[in-house]
Image (spheres, rainbow, N blue to C red):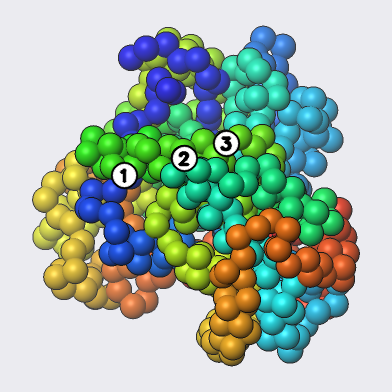
Amino acid sequence: MPESTRPFRLGIAGPVGTGKSSLIGLLCAHLSDRYSLGVVTNDIYTDEDARMLRAAGVLDPERIRAVETGACPHTAIRDDITPNLAAVEDLEADFAPLDLVLVESGGDNLTATFSPALVDAQIFVLDVAGGGDVVRKGGPGIARADLLVVNKTDLAPHVGVDAALMEREGRHARDGRPVVALSRLDPASVEALCGWVEAMIAAHAAGDHTPIDPGPMAPHSHGPDEPAHAHGPAGPGHTHGPDDPAHGPDKPAHRDGRGGTGHLPGRAVPAHRHGPSEPVHLHEHGPAVTTSQAPAAGAHAR
Amino acid sequence: MRSSEPTAPSLGPTVGSGAARADLARLLLADARLPVGGHAQSGGLEPGLLSGLDATDLPAYLTARLATVARTDAATAVVARAAALAAGRGAPTFSADEVATAWAARTPSEVVRAAARQPGRGIHRLLARLLADGPEEAAAATAGPGRAVVAWLEELPRERRYRPVALGALAAHLGLGSRATAQVSAYDDVQTVAYAAPKLLPLDPLDPVGWTLGAAPELAELVDAVAGVTHPDDIPSVAAPHLDAWHAHHARSTRRLFHA
Ligand SMILES: Nc1nc2c(ncn2[C@@H]2O[C@H](COP(=O)(O)OP(=O)(O)O)[C@@H](O)[C@H]2O)c(=O)[nH]1
Ligand SMILES: [Mg+2]
């Protein structure tokens, strides 16, 4: 592949509060003396993350841009990347030459991943406080993001989670793709994170990196006898077509793919559901708007 | 070309041009799922709600827009379409700069003009991709007028490719008539508000569907009024200062879901 002439674009995804903004702050603090950086944030409320990062003083505030998501962070990073792409391109034009553009997703649920047309690679961030089960539950980001971060390991003893076990299970769920157990209080873990990002910047610049799409769907199975599978052309022969019988609520829902046919980077398939009880996807919302006509906040199925 | 960009599937037309394609294109342009960034805007609804509008005002809000800003936008798209087509035929009438200037002169709020840049940019991206990716024969078929239409739009600096001007150019490329162009522009205005409403208010999402249908007479009247406009000077100038003020306030607020 030819050498790249534009900056490496790295997406940071993961549920609300797992530490995406903090991770970006860490990267800025550790890399901005050697690399030229830009940051795009997607927030439920416009510029909350951008303001937090600007206030952290780790990067020139002008290099941090906030994008409105129209109440739908999932759409903004995957289905319609227009505003994000515009913000990334503007940053790249205004501060050329940049080495790295970080795009923070609005905190969404476990199914949200970046479009490969927006980022070259993505980090999925979980934290120990979310519980050890989250890794086992899986999802496209957990299973197939370029890097999985298990964050806030310093909190593990306080929330009764075995961080080392969570990291091991992460590696297992990812078929050996990289995992970093991170705490901002643990310099070695911060170094591991920065080392991974630097290696990716180098691979991208050399043209050695090919973006993969984790896809919005996790490999899963529909019954005890059926092996787990991924959707899409790369997966073993099972796709959801119009003629397929509905997957009823009696079938166990998405299991992770361990013991099945493995994790396959499939092409994107549209969000869909397997039974009446399972929503297509959920967004987490922040607190209600401060108007007299406050919107109905809370999770909603789109 | 970005070296690490995944190979994009072709977006070019594969079937013959003409009425069938234009008809489909009309539906596509009216579809909120068209990925040109529309989901980030609320058609001024969030600014309005933050300034005291409530759910009972919404049907009137839709028709107020159709009488004012949506009318100026639709007429501009119609004029842009005609001018882009003329450029495509090699008999230019008005430059994109003249059309954009006429629209901007009728859109006094810098905040509102700024908000029209983002979707304009998304529409331009789509238009450029449609031309860049077409298969050989389709590219040949659209090479003349299609390229000239994009060139017409690209004469404008990026920050002046406002939505109505870009929409007119895309409509020209896709073969929409002037009535269809006006209708798509105005319908998109109504649906942008209607789609944002349940995200901002505790509403049954079916309610706004009824409001959209209720605006049918006003929408039809708008189409009749602007479909024949060809000269930038004839674009109606019907500003809505109250809406502009709400937009201005919104742009300075720090807690917003929508860009505008
Ligand atoms: N104990 C601890 N807290 C952290 C760490 N990283 C982030 N946090 C805290 O987690 C909370 C959410 O972080 P934030 O970066 O805003 O999460 P985001 O919503 O994913 O962007 C904040 O209170 C952070 O200070 C960490 O390594 N250890
Ligand atoms: Mg954040």
- Can residue B50 be seen here? The reply is no
> Could you tell me which secondary element the residue under label 2 belongs to?
loop
How far apart marks 1 and 3 lie (CA) works out to 20 Å
Seen at 18% across and 56% down, the residue is: A239
- Counting from the top left corner in percent of width and height, residue A122 is at 48, 34
Instruction: Measure the C-alpha gap from mark 3 to mark 2.
Output: 16 Å
Marks 2 & 1, CB-CB < 8 Å contact: no
Name the residue tied to disc 3.
B154
Give the quarter of the image for residue A190: top right
Q: Amino acid at mark 1?
A: Gly
Front of the two marks 1 and 3: 3
Horizontal side of A33 relative to B170 (left or right) equals right
Q: Chain of mark 1?
A: B
- Which quarter of the picture shows residue A166? top left
Please name the residue that numbered disc 2 is placed on: B90
B199 or A109: nearer the eye? B199
Few, some or many residues within 10 Å of mark 1 (<14, 14–19, 20+): some
